[in-house]
Image (spheres, grey):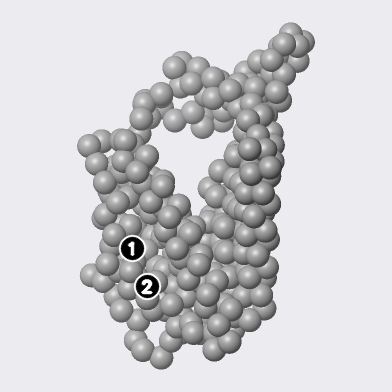
Amino acid sequence: MAVLIDLLSWLILLGGVAFALIGSVGLLRMPDFYTRLHAAGITDTLGAGLILLGLMLQAGWTLISVKLLLILIFLWFTGPIATHALSRAALLDPDNPPPILHEEAPPSKS
Amino acid sequence: MLHALALWLFCFGLWLLLSGYFDVPLLLGFGVLSCALVVFVAWRTEVIDPEERPLRLRFNLHIFSYWPWLLWQIVLSNLDVAKRILDPRLPISPTLITLRPTQRSDLGRVIYANSITLTPGTVTTALSGDTLEVHALTREAADSLLEGDMDRRVTRLEGGN
C-alpha cells in the first residue's frame, strides 16, 4: 500500500512538473502579454496544484498536509486577483500596445 | 461582539493548524494573545463588517457542487491550453468579450470573475458596475463563457439569500 501511494504521488508530482514546464514553454511561445498570462495560468493552477497534491500524498495524514492544503487554497484564491490586476494595469496604460486579437469582430452579449 | 468572537475563533483555528502546538501552555497563550491582538486591530480599523451576520452560511449548499465542477473545468481548460501550446501551429485566436453577469451581489460577481480568471484560457480584465470584460485565449473559450453555464452556476450559489 505504501509503495502504491508512493508511486501515485510521484506520478502526480511528475504531472505537476510537466504542466509547470508546459506553462513556461507557453510563456515563451505566446505572441503578446495577454496570451502569455494564459500560459502562466497553467503553471499557477494545475502545475502548482498537482505538485502540492503529490507532496500531500508524501506527507500523509499529518499537519504538513493541512499546511500544504492551505497553501493551495490561498494560492488559488489570490492567484486570479494578481493576474487580474496585471492585465487591468496593462490594458489601462495607453503606452502599452493593444492586445493582439483574432481577425473577426469580437462577439458581445447584451 | 459576535463578529469579533467569530474572527477570533477563525484566527485561533488557523493558528493551531499552522503552529501544530497543542500542549505547550506558554505558546498556546501567545497564540491566544496574538489572535486577540488581530481582533483588536480589526476592531480599531473597523474592518469587522457590521452588516454581515457572523457564522452564517453566506452561500447555500450549491457551493459543494460548484467547487468540484470548477475544479473539473480548470483541469479541462488546462489540458486544452496545454495542447495548444505544444501544437507547432499555435492555434490560438485571442478575443476580448464583454459579459453581463447575472449575479446580484458584489461577492457573487467577484466569485464569477475569479472563477473566470482561475480557469486558464480566460482572464477577467475589467469588472465595473454590471459588465465584465474578459480576454480569452481562444474563440471557443470565449464562446463557452458567452453560453453562460458558469454564470448560471455562480448565480445559483447566491440564490435564496
Query: In this view, which residue lies farthest toward the bottom?
Result: A103
Left or right: residue B132 compared with residue B81? left
Kind of element beneath mark 1 = strand
Left or right: residue A27 compared with residue B61? right
Q: What amino acid type should be assigned to the residue bearing mark 1?
A: Thr
Q: Position of residue A94 (x, y in %)?
A: 55, 78
Kind of element beneath mark 2 = helix
Chain of residue at mark 2: B
Residue receiving disc 2: B142
Q: Is residue A30 above or below residue A18?
A: below
Tell me the quarter of the picture where residue B43 sits: top right
Front one among B100 and A60? A60
**Residue B159 seen in the figure:** yes
**Residue B33 seen in the figure:** no
Q: Is residue B145 above or below residue B4?
A: below
Residue at left offset 68%, top offset 68%: A21
Left or right: residue B43 compared with residue A61? left
Q: Position of residue B107 (x, y in %)?
A: 38, 45
Q: Tag on residue A39?
A: none
Residue receiving disc 1: B131
Q: Do labels 1 and 2 touch, CB within 8 Å?
A: no
Front one among A95 and B108? B108
Q: Position of residue A49 (x, y in %)?
A: 59, 52
